[in-house]
Amino acid sequence: DIQMTQSPSSLSASVGDRVTITCRAGQSISTYLNWYQQKPGKAPKLLIYGASSLQSGVPSRFSGSGSGTDFTLTISSLQPEDFATYYCQQSYTTPATFGQGTKVEIK
Amino acid sequence: QVQLVQSGSELKKPGASVKVSCKSSGYTFTSYGVNWVRQAPGQGLEWMGWINTNTGNPTYAQGFTGRFVFSLDTSVSTAYLQIRPLKAEDTAVYYCARGSGSGWDFDYWGQGTLVTVSS
């Protein structure tokens, strides 16, 4: 199985901050990397697919980059509704595997 | 619009069985696979496997063989997850999620079903 490792596990930030979350794959996955946002008690929501493609309806302050083993999710200006847990997931092969999550909290 | 609507929370005793439903609407059901994802309390996301809605063929991730069964009723655009016999460690929220069709990314999710296993 391909292990996905996110960092940090949690972070505190203020509204308006630029936030960066990284995800490292245990082997090369090309650009088969997706990012999800999950709020408490809710289902995950697809934000970014194919490492850098914005899912329809997702605000443009979210962006993704990377290829191979190293990937980044960036929120350019954190908004109150962005406080949530973010997961990366590789879709290169089965089993699909997720990172452990990064919780973004209010500073 | 695309929707996946799951059945409600369940409280079961160890050794019993549970069947979670996931009803799809807003798209052609047999054109996209249905995946199942588990989230234990306070934990991350774990892919359980998927079912090909065109052929009915299920694929189970390691750790989800034997007691877990994926099935379909295409006449009502519904996928099912059955677990039996239940164990305490099966307590979790179970999500169904549509495969996007271009890979193993999941573009629409059900709201989740909490299954609690307790004596």
Image (spheres, coloured by chain):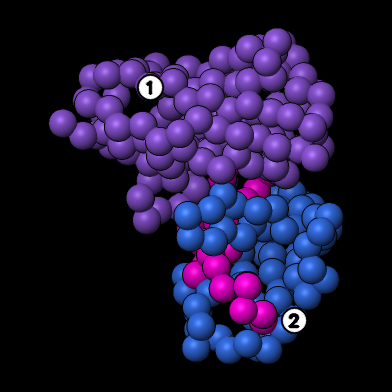
Residue A2 or residue B110, whichever sits in front: B110
The residue at which mark 1 appears reads as B18
Q: Is residue A100 magenta?
A: yes
Q: Which residues are magenta?
A: A78-103
The answer to whether any part of residue A93 appears in the image is: no
Q: Quadrant of residue B106?
A: top right
Q: Report the residue at 63% width, 73% height from top.
A: A81
Residue B108 or residue A30, whichever sits in front: B108
Q: Chain of mark 2?
A: A
The residue at which mark 2 appears reads as A76
Residue A5 or residue B112, whichever sits in front: B112
Q: Quadrant of residue A99?
A: bottom right
Q: Residue A90, relative to residue B47: is it above or below?
A: below
Across and down, in percent, residue A8 comes to 51, 74
Across and down, in percent, residue A12 comes to 50, 83
Tell me if A103 is positioned left or right of A46 in this view: left
Across and down, in percent, residue B82 comes to 44, 20
Q: Report the residue at 36% width, 32% height from top.
A: B10
Q: Report the residue at 63% width, 72% height from top.
A: A82
Q: Report the residue at 74% width, 81% height from top.
A: A76
Within 10 angstroms of label 1, few (less than 14), some, or many (20 or more) residues?
A: some
Apparent colour of chain A: blue
Mark 2 or mark 1, whichever is nearer to me: 1
The amino acid beneath tag 2 is Ser
* Colour-to-chain, purple: B
Q: Residue B78, relative to residue B102: is it above or below?
A: above
